DNA sequence: CCCGAGCATGCACTCGATTGCAAGCCTCCC
DNA sequence: GGGAGGCTTGCAATCGAGTGCATGCTCGGG
């Protein structure tokens, strides 16, 4: 070698760059500073190859590494290992208040374990979902947390078939053998119906969420079976086109025309707000004329006019749990899919009241109704 | 080499893996399939080296590439180019309703240009911010969009000094020569004061945001100078410890004790909700006893009880604009920092009314008040 | 005292794509 | 017909870290 010593870093200095970013030290830098081969430095710094290196050397390398402020380049590592310590998170729309707490939970748990999250919005569009999914795939994400599942979702079936690690959160897909974390829709709706019957309602309607989503279907089913327990049937039921305020309003207008419910169970809080709008349109008042119940207990939903009675779903915990399941799967700790149902609670507020011209029945919580 | 031809892909098949992910085709695969050298394939597929390759070859390579479903491995590319087509987004807390629209705007604009966003929450903790910042740095993000700026922020000064590309959004940092996109706080507050004076208020108080944030300070300054234009001075002003409901309540209780304002301008909507809480505590009613105004016009804030008068800030557009500035900077299209002020509008709702025992003055919008 | 076992370390190749440089071919013109 | 120049393409090194294999050293036993 004719190269004089100390010329180890051949990156030529840029001619006239004002203040370029100082290059981070690499593994080679650490190695030469510690007087060892890069391979040795690599092994010394790596948890599960450390045993191959003499303890004294390990110590020296580690000290040099911290002294230089070395941290491995995740890109280079990913290239070699095919893992990126990154997971993809798909949500319909982060602007929908249900999702920020979920995402926050996911990110918090991931960060705690050295992972980072790549988030994308799909707007419930399968095509956008597929695009984002592929883009994340290309970026070598190790797995996915999916809040956008459709009841029948070819994209997910396909991916699951290829063995892509993923966890569904909030929503499910039928016949898909992957882990999922959701709120207990059935119990939630059941509590809602208990509450309304308690208040004396018998003509209860339902503004269901879109039938393309598991939550839409599950809550509608739960609604019907809860009514059956009281020998009641739905005053009317209309399915909204989307989980949005506008769709809720449209559906509610239809519902009010179809039956004449004294109470309405909405598929989620946004639909419930749409119901408020529809009542406004018709000059009706909630809860005096019609009681309304939502689902999810979004932030600030208790401060609406009137405060919305809703079912609280522990969104943050949903996110935490989903992230936990995914990392368990990635680390090989657990291999069989698990379905986790998180408990929900009914939060009674001002949007529910006895039906017009009636007094509330008094009844023990959860007990069977005494026959008429 | 004794290796028979056709053995180009030496990855041995795993023994008993049920359904592994099919390996994505690489550039080499495309190259051999097209009968060219990988380097040629690379140039053919790359926008700005394409001119070096014979058009017929380009076409052949591109066809083979799409036939094989090739897409470049961003990890490998990043390693070589030191760019990742990824930008880091720092927000205090995605759970705060102000931020989702901003993030959404950022992500939408980035996605449209082939970039992706890495989001992290800092909880306004400089230490967490530094950690996240470093983690993103390690992941080779090309630049940052920062919604967590503190008024005096060593982290940002340091990074800016090193030439790290970044754009501030929503908040600013003093004496920092980087691009920033914010709502026009000064005009917003000015409109608020106009409106309150219009209604007949003269004893106006302020619950200011934390003085560690530019928005806290800027809005307070704007508040005082707006009052001066009417020869008024603040009935009282208290600085909240954080932009949270709880901090707003505490500050408001103090404020009500200090002065006896008939109207209160809150530093943002969350603080305004805290003001509602405080009024509740004391058995006062808004707007009958005290008018309250917020800032930001968060989603659903108009559906509160009472509907909050607030200043609408175009958050989504803030995000879009911030992303645009950053990408302009990254592409070298624009090099000098720019400050963008987006226009805001006052949205008058039910939380503001004339002061107790007074009728509203009628006054032309924005005109100087007629002296006493 | 010598040889073998075993531990510690170094060497070199790899992941997938990019890019400076070299080489080949063709064409055009003298 | 021959040479020069330009257009295409190939070669090989590189980014930073991980890893199978080879090598060297040390220590212990015979």
Image: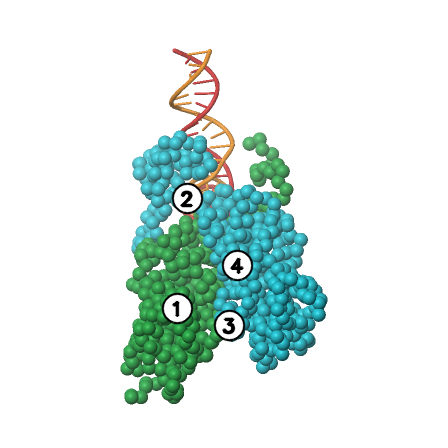
Chain colours: A cyan, B green, C red, D orange
Q: Where is residue B295 in the image (x, y as percent from the top left)?
A: 41, 72
Query: How many neighbours does mark 3 have within 10 angstroms: few (below 14), some (14-19), or many (20 or more)?
Result: some
Which chain is mark 1 on?
A: B
2 or 4: mark nearer the eye: 4
Pointer 4 local density, CA inside 10 Å: few below 14, some 14–19, many at least 20: many
Residue designated by label 2: A72
- For label 1, the residue is B249
Mark 1 residue element: helix
Label pair 2/4, CB-CB below 8 angstroms: no
Give the distance between the C-alpha atoms of the residues marked 1 and 2, in whole angstroms. 46 Å
Question: Which residue is painted at 37% across and 43% down in the image?
Answer: A70
Question: Which type of secondary structure does the marked residue at label 3 adopt?
Answer: loop
Across and down, in percent, residue B36 comes to 55, 46
- In terms of depth relative to the viewer, which is nearer, D11 or D21? D21
Can marks 2 and 3 be said to lie on one chain?
A: yes
Query: Any mark on residue A183, and which?
Result: none
Disc sitting over residue A304 in the figure: 3
Q: Determine if marks 4 and 3 fall on one subunit.
A: yes
Instruction: Pick whichever, B37 or B161, lies toward us.
Output: B161
Chain where mark 4 sits: A
């Amino acid at each position: 070698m004719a190269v004089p010593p100390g010329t180890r870093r051949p990156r030529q200095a840029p001619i006239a760059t004002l203040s370029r970013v100082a290059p981070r030290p690499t593994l080679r830098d650490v190695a030469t500073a510690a007087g060892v081969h890069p391979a040795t430095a690599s092994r010394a710094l790596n948890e599960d190859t450390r045993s191959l290196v003499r303890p004294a050397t390990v110590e020296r390398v580690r000290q040099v590494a911290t002294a230089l402020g070395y941290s491995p380049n995740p890109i280079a590592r990913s290239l070699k290992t095919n893992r990126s310590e990154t997971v993809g998170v798909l949500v319909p729309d982060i602007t929908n208040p249900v999702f920020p707490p979920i995402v926050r939970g996911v990110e918090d748990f991931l960060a705690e374990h050295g992972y980072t999250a790549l988030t994308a919005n799909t707007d419930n569009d399968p095509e956008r979902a597929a695009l984002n999914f592929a883009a994340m795939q290309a970026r070598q994400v190790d797995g996915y947390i999916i809040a956008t599942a459709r009841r029948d979702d070819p994209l997910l079936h396909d991916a699951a078939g290829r063995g892509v690690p993923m966890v569904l959160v909030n929503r499910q897909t039928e016949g898909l053998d992957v882990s999922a974390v959701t709120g207990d829709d059935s119990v939630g709706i059941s509590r809602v119906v208990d509450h309304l019957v308690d208040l004396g309602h018998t003509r209860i309607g339902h503004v269901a969420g879109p039938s393309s989503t598991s939550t839409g279907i599950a809550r509608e089913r739960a609604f019907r079976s809860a009514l059956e327990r009281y020998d009641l049937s739905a005053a009317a039921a209309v399915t909204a086109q989307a989980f949005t305020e506008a769709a809720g309003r449209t559906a509610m207008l239809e519902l009010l025309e179809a039956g004449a419910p004294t109470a309405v169970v909405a598929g989620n809080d946004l639909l419930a707000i749409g119901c408020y709008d529809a009542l406004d349109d018709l000059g009706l008042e909630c809860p005096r004329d019609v009681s309304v119940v939502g689902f999810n207990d979004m932030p600030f939903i208790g401060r609406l006019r009137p405060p919305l009675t809703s079912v609280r779903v522990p969104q943050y915990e949903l996110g935490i749990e989903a992230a936990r399941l995914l990392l368990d799967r990635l680390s090989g700790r657990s291999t069989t899919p698990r379905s986790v149902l998180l408990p929900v609670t009914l939060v009674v507020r001002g949007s529910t009241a006895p039906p017009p011209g009636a007094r509330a029945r008094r009844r023990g919580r959860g007990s069977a109704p005494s026959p008429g």
